[in-house]
Amino acid sequence: MKKLLYGVAYYDEYMPYERLDTDIAMMKAAGINLVRIAESTWSTHEPQNGVFDFSSVDRVLDAMHRAGIHVIVGTPTYAVPTWMVKEHPDVLAETPDGPGRYGARQIMDIANPTYLFYAERIIRKLIGHVCGHPAVIGYQVDNETKHYRTSGPNVQHRFVKYVKDKFGTVERLNREFGLDYWSNRINSWEDFPSVVGTINGSLGAEFARFQRQLVTEFLAWQASIVNEYKRPDQFVTHNFDFEWRGYSFGVQPDVDHFEAAKALDIAGVDIYHPSQDELTGKEISFGGDSTRSLKGTNYFVLETQAQAFPHWTPYPGQLRLQAFSHLASGANMVEYWHWHSIHNSFETYWKGLLSHDLGTNPTYEEAATIGRDFARLSPKLVNLKKMCRAAVLVSNEALTALEWFPLPGGSVRYNDIVRLLYDRLYEMNVGCDILHPGSSGSFAQYDLIVVPALYAASDELLERLNRYVENGGHVVYTFKSGFADEHVKVRTGVQPGLIGEACGVRYSQFVEPKSVSLKGDPFGVGAELNGVSVWMELLTPTTAEVLAWYDHPHWGAYAAITENRYGKGTATYIGCLPSAAVIGKVLERACKTAGLWGADQELRFPLIVKSGTNERGKTVRYYFNYSDEPRSFDYPHEDGLELLADRPVRSGERIELDRWGVAIIETA
């Protein structure tokens, strides 16, 4: 990319009256230089089977081109038209809840041949129609694609072929998955039952892996079609999303982002987060680090909030803070969903940059200041290169396995553990990449790798981590790591299995803690934050130094948190679920041991620092105040230029940040 893109999703088809020219004038005034269109309106573009009408697309493309606004065209395949379901009701996904019903979006079976026939036809018709238009700079394939729990007969048939190809014989499958249990043994491929009712976690987890593969194949298939039409100067992207807990939270359980991103030119993402007093930047950072790591380069924010839900209307200054936070993680585009607030149907109150009166408002006016700054500073901020020395390793397989075998009470899940660790690093201003089990790059480029709850993992991955420590790296493991293999088969040796020697601990028992704390408050967090909840492993150190013992009349002889020198490196093992404060102290110790502590780490949340190198080879540091009170700090680096105010900054100078404020300093 040669410049920052600042955009909105735009749906001329949804407008209550004709106002295209007015919208474009307001976009230009706000510095909007990009719109995304067409991904939501299949029924408009193909109102009847084989009848195509792209007039709404044409008028928007022509108008945007005249205004100098770029366009991304989306393939409209995530919401099927009524005529298709009427003629072919089997295109709706059959899920464990039964046959699908028409009405919502993303209700189709992405493996259904009839659906794929019509999807390919609309893709070819639309992309073939627009690919030569000078306004079009790229394409988005589908929208927040997932497998939608599709599990009907055709999917089951494909799954049997998949496991047959993977395991070869039913004997091996039965052995790996323990299917003798409760007479679940499969003695011929022809007898393979539907997996929908399985109680076998290994089989269920394999089906979930297969469903994620369906998504990978579906997006690669769409990208391959679009690639037949796109010009050399155009790109293909997709907007990945995350586990949803009312906002973007953690690793997406239904998609392997790393595999699915391989078919794309540029990785894209949708990031939504709490706002007002709950705005922390953590979701922006986690989503950005995750997406940047997919292809190891800059990415697009294809959707984020302007106003969104009524209770997410941003405080003054927050829209700016959010926009520059995306850039600080490596984004080259910030695009709002969406331009205008819709006047009816399901997302009526998911408000856009404009409210329902379609006029100016404080959020729009603040967006205009962002647009001006993006345009002015684009040469210095675009293509920010980030080189992180720490990483967090996440795993779809571990996530699925812990869904099958949850922690006591079920309130703490895999992504809670991921975010517990990631958020503490964020608060300490330790920049991270996100790794996954198939990461092809060398672990050796990192000084610290944090591994949350790696419950299901192959021998090869665990041995890789062992070698990383032996060669001088530092790993922080949490409880439940190394317990089962990649087929969710519990290892038969003493836990934590293959990583036990590197961690210098062993255990064979675990309990749900009742009134357990850490002996002597070893991290100085105070009695209220010194407790242990949900899970505790009864660790016996072999070679490890004990950082914390349990304080309990019966479990007090066991270690809770340990640190072990192994070869040239260090492995930290957290055998329980302590408080966020304790996790923060453990990670602080690990960061210092790994040599990751410096001036930026002396600042703490709500003061957030992110940095990278721009195209001119200069260091750019973003300073954010994620609080409703003014904050200040002594600038600790070499002299530079504060870009927003265009003023020099001296080393040691006191920097004042308004509430929800941001400063950007460029140095040589």
Image (cartoon, rainbow, N blue to C red):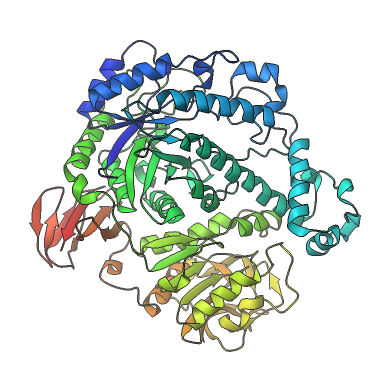
Q: On the image, which quarter does residue 109 sit in? A: top right
Measured from the top left, where is residue 34 in percent x and y? Answer: 31, 32
- In which quadrant will I find the N terminus? top left
Visible residue check, residue 208? yes
Image position of 1 (left or right of 583): left
Measured from the top left, where is residue 651 in percent x and y? Answer: 12, 67
Q: Residue 546 or 205: which is nearer the viewer?
A: 205
Visible residue check, residue 290? no
Q: Residue at x 65, y 64 (%)?
A: 456
Q: Residue 485 or 455: which is nearer the viewer?
A: 485
Q: Residue at x 45, y 78 (%)?
A: 473
The image shows residue 118, relative to residue 293, as above or below, that is above
Q: Residue 158 or 224: which is nearer the viewer?
A: 224
Q: Residue at x 8, y 53 (%)?
A: 647
Number of marks: 0
- In which quadrant will I find the C terminus? bottom left
Measured from the top left, where is residue 270 in percent x and y? Answer: 44, 41
Measured from the top left, where is residue 383 in percent x and y? Answer: 29, 51
The image shows residue 317, relative to residue 594, as above or below, that is above
Residue sticking out furthest to the top: 17
Q: Residue at x 72, y 26 (%)?
A: 90
The image shows residue 29, relative to residue 562, as above or below, that is above
Q: On the image, which quarter does residue 277 sit in? A: top left
